[in-house]
Image (cartoon, rainbow, N blue to C red):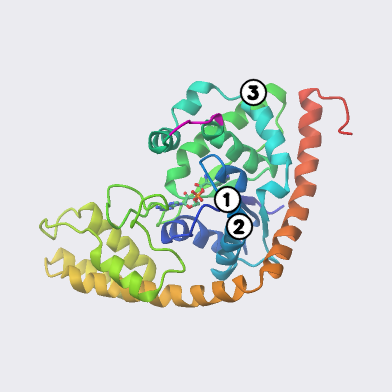
């Protein structure tokens, strides 16, 4: 049987080139080789303050973007987490196997709770348990993510192991799959990762050409000497150069850098044009898809139907081994 891939993305704002290079581009590459499920994780999106009136449109937006970059709904199961309520049931079972200490140690929890004004709710801390449930509900083997998710994946493996040793070997231990763009840094602060929540840090997949050029022109580089170790801003620009231009262009700039002949303005111009060229067809396809909300809804609902059958099957097994003998009525 083909190995199974699962991954997720939150409908919390515009999909950016970090999400694209770290995860979604890889999803497209994997869809021909593996049995793949990709989930728009709206239950995760409510772990921080959100607007209930926006979430539906944001889901359609993420779906349109995923299809625009090349996910084929005939090949993959693309669905919305909340249309498969089994995710939350399994989360509860796993919550009872997860130590509080391990959740408190999660870097993402610490970062997000430090930024949160007001109450921090238990859902934010349990975020990685829900993520574990997402993955093992479908018995996935491989999880293509950016490297900020590695710690969550390690915890997912630990929780899975605990389940298997307590109740019997039901689940494979999921493995992360990383790409060369696994960590794209913020353009305006290359010591932090590019993120929807850092103003001015990212380029979204529907960004207009002029805005792309401007953001790249303003990207932080370094005043340091060329030829030696690159500073974080320059390293990040080279990552974008490699992702969005041809290999010979990348090689030439690398040589110029080594020979101390690189002009950052040329580098930025080439990257800006490369991104504009790469994203223009994606932006156009995305707009066409967004004009067909019923089609997007149908794709997601068909995906949800397929996912739910599997999820129910897994939960039947889980309930049995955990000793819940009363049927769901
Ligand atoms: P989200 O929506 O925050 O991120 C979606 C994906 O984008 C990657 N990513 C990045 N990659 C490279 N550079 C960056 N600057 C960058 N920023 C984000 C993330 O690593 C992620 O792969 N917790 C997940 C959502 C999720 C999930 C799952 C993933 C929920 N359940 C089960 C895998 C399996 C997340 O970070 O979403």
Is 288 contained in the magenta span? no
In the structure shown, which secondary structural element does the residue marked by tag 1 occupy? strand
Name the foreground residue: 73 vs 36.
Answer: 73
In the structure shown, which secondary structural element does the residue marked by tag 2 occupy? helix
Is 119 contained in the magenta span? yes
Asked if labels 1 and 2 touch by Cβ distance under 8 angstroms, the answer is: no
Image coords of residue 239 (percent x, y): 33, 61
From which residue to which does the magenta span run? 118-122
In this rendering, the answer to whether 321 lies above or below 128 is: above
In this rendering, the answer to whether 299 lies above or below 276 is: above
In the drawing, does residue 66 fall left or right of residue 277?
right
Image coords of residue 164 (percent x, y): 67, 28
Residue wearing tag 3: 96
In this rendering, the answer to whether 314 lies above or below 168 is: below
Image coords of residue 150 (percent x, y): 46, 41
Residue wearing tag 2: 59
Mark 2 → mark 1, Cα distance in angstroms: 12 Å
The response on whether ligand 1 sits within 8 Å of label 1 is: yes
Nearest to N terminus: mark 2 or mark 1: 1
In the structure shown, which secondary structural element does the residue marked by tag 3 occupy? loop
> Magenta region, mostly helix, strand or loop?
loop
């Amino acid at each position: 049987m083909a190995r199974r891939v699962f991954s997720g993305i939150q409908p919390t704002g515009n999909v950016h080139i970090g999400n694209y290079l770290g995860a979604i581009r890889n999803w497209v590459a994997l869809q021909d080789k593996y049995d793949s499920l990709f989930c728009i994780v709206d239950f995760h999106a409510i772990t921080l303050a959100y607007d209930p009136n926006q979430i539906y449109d944001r889901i359609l937006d993420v779906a349109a973007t995923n299809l625009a970059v090349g996910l084929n709904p005939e090949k993959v199961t693309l669905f919305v987490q909340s249309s498969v309520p089994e995710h939350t049931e399994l989360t509860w079972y796993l919550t009872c196997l997860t130590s509080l200490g391990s959740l408190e140690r999660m870097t993402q929890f610490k970062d997000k709770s430090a930024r949160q004004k007001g109450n921090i709710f238990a859902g934010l801390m349990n975020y990685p348990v829900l993520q574990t449930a997402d993955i093992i509900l479908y018995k996935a083997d491989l999880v293509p993510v950016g490297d900020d998710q590695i710690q969550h994946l390690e915890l997912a493996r630990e929780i899975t192991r605990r389940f298997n040793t307590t109740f019997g070997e039901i689940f494979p231990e999921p493995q992360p799959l990383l790409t060369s763009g696994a960590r794209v840094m913020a353009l305006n602060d290359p010591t932090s990762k590019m993120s929807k929540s850092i103003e001015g840090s990212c380029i979204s997949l529907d960004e207009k050409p002029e805005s792309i050029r401007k953001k790249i022109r303003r990207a932080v580089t370094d005043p340091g000497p060329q030829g030696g170790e690159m500073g974080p801003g320059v390293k990040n620009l080279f990552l974008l150069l490699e992702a969005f231009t041809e290999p010979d262009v990348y090689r030439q700039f690398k040589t110029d850098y080594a020979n101390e002949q690189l002009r950052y303005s040329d580098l930025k111009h080439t990257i800006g044009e490369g991104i504009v060229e790469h994203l223009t067809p994606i932006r156009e396809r995305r707009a066409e898809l967004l004009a067909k909300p019923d089609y997007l809804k149908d794709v997601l609902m068909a995906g949800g139907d397929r996912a739910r059958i599997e999820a129910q099957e897994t939960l039947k097994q889980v309930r049995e081994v955990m000793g819940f003998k009363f049927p769901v009525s």
